Image: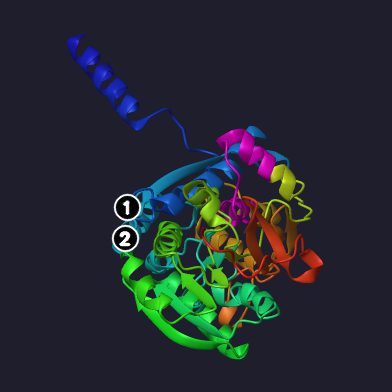
Amino acid sequence: MKRITCIALVVSLCLLLAGPAGADEGVYKIGVITSLSGGLATGGNVTKQGYEMWAKRVNAAGGIDVAGKKYPVKLIYGDAQSEPSQAASAAERLAAREKIDFALGPYSSGVTLAAAPVLEKYKIPMITGSAESPLIWREKFKFTFGTIPPVNFTGSGPLEVIATLNPPPKRAVVIGSNDAFSKATAETFRDTCKKLNIKVMKYDIVPSGQDLTPYMSAVRAMRPDVIAFGGHDEELIRLVKALRQINYAPKALLMHYGVTEPAFVEALGQDAEQVYGASVWTSSLKTTGDLIWKDAASYAADIKKTFGIEPDYTMAGCSTAGLAFQAAIMKIGAVPPLDDKAKLALVDALENLDFNTFYGPVKFSHEGEFYHANTGLTPLALQIQNGKTVIIGPDAFKEADAQYPMKSWK
């Protein structure tokens, strides 16, 4: 009797450790690789909220509908810790131990470039909602896709608008932080300036995270009309603070990422006014969605209600990454868990995807330098005016005229 009791106790303990029987059966296991700690944690948590918003709405409806039956989704996180090596380790764990069906990718291009080869090895599809370096797409990873176009596709828009203003800018200083995305952004700004006959007086790649005040003091002596900077959110805030401290306002101050993120205006207040940026989405954009959210405004309202913040294009791109997987899964009718054959079919479905979302069209490129990037979107030129981000170009999307030249800090 004692032996039977002991056996029963052991079996019960094993069941407790293993969790409920069939806990993950009939559930899509989705790995989320992003930076939840370290220097990129602000952006990493923006991606997390975007992915979570999609998962919440899918599960609230019962799951992804496949042939009339619904299958929930489960997000399993891997913290990249803002380091490429940690991103690779997180991808390895999610693929080998967690046996994920597919993955939602990191904030930042350097981290994405580290995770992609690992998922390639395991033949696991990944869509990143927040990586814009052209280097990713030039690698032509078969299993990696992105809902946000690369920066060399989107970054020229603001400069093209600025070049038409009066008096037209003649001189520029272009700077980028030393990481994949920021360098690609700076290269795009430099090349666009040259194309528009704006003389690049100085082009420099600086260490990530450095104090920019001494650097901007030297730039002030050059009196450039345009200062264009490629960097991440916290660096962009530091740049504005540095210019404010030395009291130098160029005719135009341009960034790429940052101006659409609520934290940028919250951190800088009035000093964020008139800063230019680039994007492919704002909450005021007129779009029509086929899945979950009917348009940009309804998505923004859902984010506001759920998280108490205004969404930026990164958060929107991440939710759209979930929608893209959802549409592709529904198309091929694959139920969890996905075997290698189903994962290859999922890649094929993603390559042929062409549908409308609250974010805009999703259509991944099949070839060339934008391979597997979403090139169905229109690059937008933005500026912060009266505490809000408005579209200043192209004309078909224009909400306001550009405010130019930039006012003095005082």
Percent x, y for residue 208? 33, 67
Residue 100 drawn above or below residue 169: above
Q: How far apart are marks 2 and 1 (CA)?
A: 8 Å
Q: Quadrant of the N terminus?
A: top left
- Callout 1: SS: loop
Identify the mark at residue 16; answer none if there is no mark. Answer: none
Q: What residue type is labelled 1?
A: Gly
Tell me whether the residue at label 2 lies in contact with that at label 1, contact meaning CB atoms closer than 8 angstroms. yes
Q: For the residue carrying disc 1, how many other residues have a C-alpha within 10 Å: few (<14), some (14-19), or many (20+)?
A: few
Closer to the camera in the image, 166 or 364: 166
Closer to the camera in the image, 379 or 54: 379
Q: 104 left or right of 2?
A: right
Q: Residue furthest front?
A: 410
Residue 141 visible in the snapshot: no
Q: Which amino acid does label 2 sit on?
A: Glu
Residue 272 drawn above or below residue 216: above
Percent x, y for residue 368? 59, 83
* Magenta range: 300-324
Give the residue at mark 2.
83
Percent x, y for residue 227? 50, 74
- Mark in the foreground, 2 or 1: 1
| Secondary structure mostly taken by the magenta-highlighted segment of the chain | helix
Residue 342 visible in the snapshot: yes
Give the residue at mark 1.
38
